[in-house]
Amino acid sequence: MTVLGTHPLWRPYTQMKIASPPLEAVATRGSRITLADGRELIDGIASWWTAVHGYNHPHIAAAMADQLARMPHVMFGGLTHAPAERLGRRLAALLPGDLNHVFFTDSGSVAVEVALKMAVQLWLNRGETGRTRVLAFRGGYHGDTMGAMSACDPEEGMHRRFGAYMPTQLFCDLPRDAEAAAALDAVLARHRHELAAVIVEPLVQGAGGMLMHPPEVLATVARLARRHGLPLIADEIFTGFARTGAMFACEQAGVVPDILCLSKALTGGTLALAATVATTEIFSAFWSDDPAAALMHGPTFMANPLACAAANASLDLFEAEPRLAQCAGIAARLTEGLASLKGRPGVADIRVLGAVGTVEFAGTPDLADLKRRFLDRGVWVRPFGRIVYLTPALTIAPADLDSLIDAVQAVVRETTG
């Protein structure tokens, strides 16, 4: 047990007094993490869903080395540079519809903050006041900063203790059936004049428990937002870049959001970078002779050239290598491999979408015990809440994927008796 004051590092989401010491990683390669004690772990979650091409891809490493030698960073206020210009054009061409205007930040939470600020300031620039709230969905998670926290699930989310400190948003259930759709429609109608936008995680509510919904549900959300004249913010920080079986989850529902947030896999899991991308209609509300109508946000490391070079190299790999086909192969193997756990006593549900596989327990398991059991089997898996999940690199070797699935099967069986 760590003694108070003897260690300078404060860990994420961790009660430092009782937490086990973290494992020291010394190297990565492909889908594997090497520890200081010599053990090698198969990474089942791609470092919080970021390393889609695996670790240390030589093409990304070469692009970063070249950029590092020339210009690792320069401020983006009043200056520009080729890596950001190229990345912005490529994202605009890759995203659906007229999502043509890219605002770079340095984390997913901040990308959401910018999206919320865009939505609120949109109405102010149009001369409408009082539209300061967003409608979000139960089970959702959008980040750890203040505005992002306020749009997370208010009851089950990790941020509920901050309720009195945060902005107050509106929450509905996802419209999975006609009754829920009617309820959402009614709330939007009743509160439309105080709402700035609707925000949703397309197809998978990630940190909320890998809760999945079909494209028809997302299409209903988009249709109702349009009916009430509200911008739709799609938080694709987790789902973007081929994780769900399409390059972007919104594409599976034929939905073009008004604002879309990206991060995590944007640089292939190498450096911090995020983007908030808006349609031309949203951008036009900020296009003015009035300086006060400009979007008031500007991170110090916005559009960091080194991160943009990594992101461009990552997009090269999506163009040159069969990531969507690899995702489909992972989905098929996850579906087959986890099926044997379906209906088992103590298992509430099995869910697979693209390269996301989830086992939900009927009760809350001993998470520390689960983590130990996975480590004993040589895999890096981080269960939370009531779930064990896999989100491996899209490039994972079939044998490594089988090892991950075997470990999940074994640990779940041991845990549920």
Image (cartoon, rainbow, N blue to C red):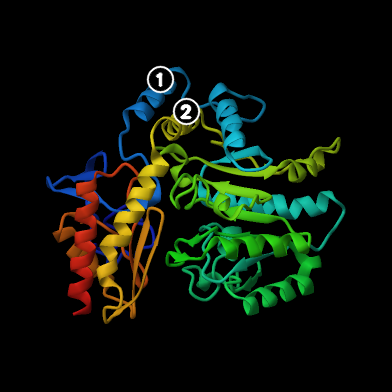
Query: Looking at the image, which residue is at 50% across and 31% down?
Result: 308
Say if 131 sits above or below 78 in the image: below
Q: Which mark is residue 377?
A: none
- Give the alpha-carbon distance from disc 2 to disc 1, as whole Å: 9 Å
* Nearer-the-camera pick, 68 or 411: 411
**x, y percentage for residue 404?**
23, 56
Say if 170 sits above or below 96 in the image: below
- Disc 1: CA contacts within 10 A as few (<14), some (14-19) or many (>=20): few
* Nearer-the-camera pick, 188 or 162: 188
**x, y percentage for residue 253?**
58, 55
Say if 303 sits above or below 342 in the image: above
Name the residue beneath numbered marker 2: 309
Query: Looking at the image, which residue is at 27% across and 58% down?
Result: 381
Q: Which mark is residue 66?
A: 1
Q: Is residue 1 visible?
A: no
- Disc 2: CA contacts within 10 A as few (<14), some (14-19) or many (>=20): many
Q: Is residue 179 visible?
A: yes
* Nearer-the-camera pick, 108 or 184: 184
Q: Amino acid at mark 1?
A: Asp
Q: Amino acid at mark 2?
A: Ala
Quarter of the view holding residue 136: bottom right
Say if 299 sits above or below 75 in the image: below
The reply, left or right, for residue 328 in relation to residue 197 is left
Are the residues at dot 2 and dot 1 in contact (C-beta closer than 8 Å)?
yes
**x, y percentage for residue 333?**
29, 55
Quarter of the view holding residue 227: bottom right
Q: Which quadrant does the C terminus fall into?
A: bottom left
Q: Which quadrant does the N terminus fall into?
A: bottom left
Q: SS at mark 2?
A: helix
Instruction: Tell which residue pokes out farthest to the top in this image.
Output: 70
Query: Looking at the image, which residue is at 44% across and 43% down?
Result: 265
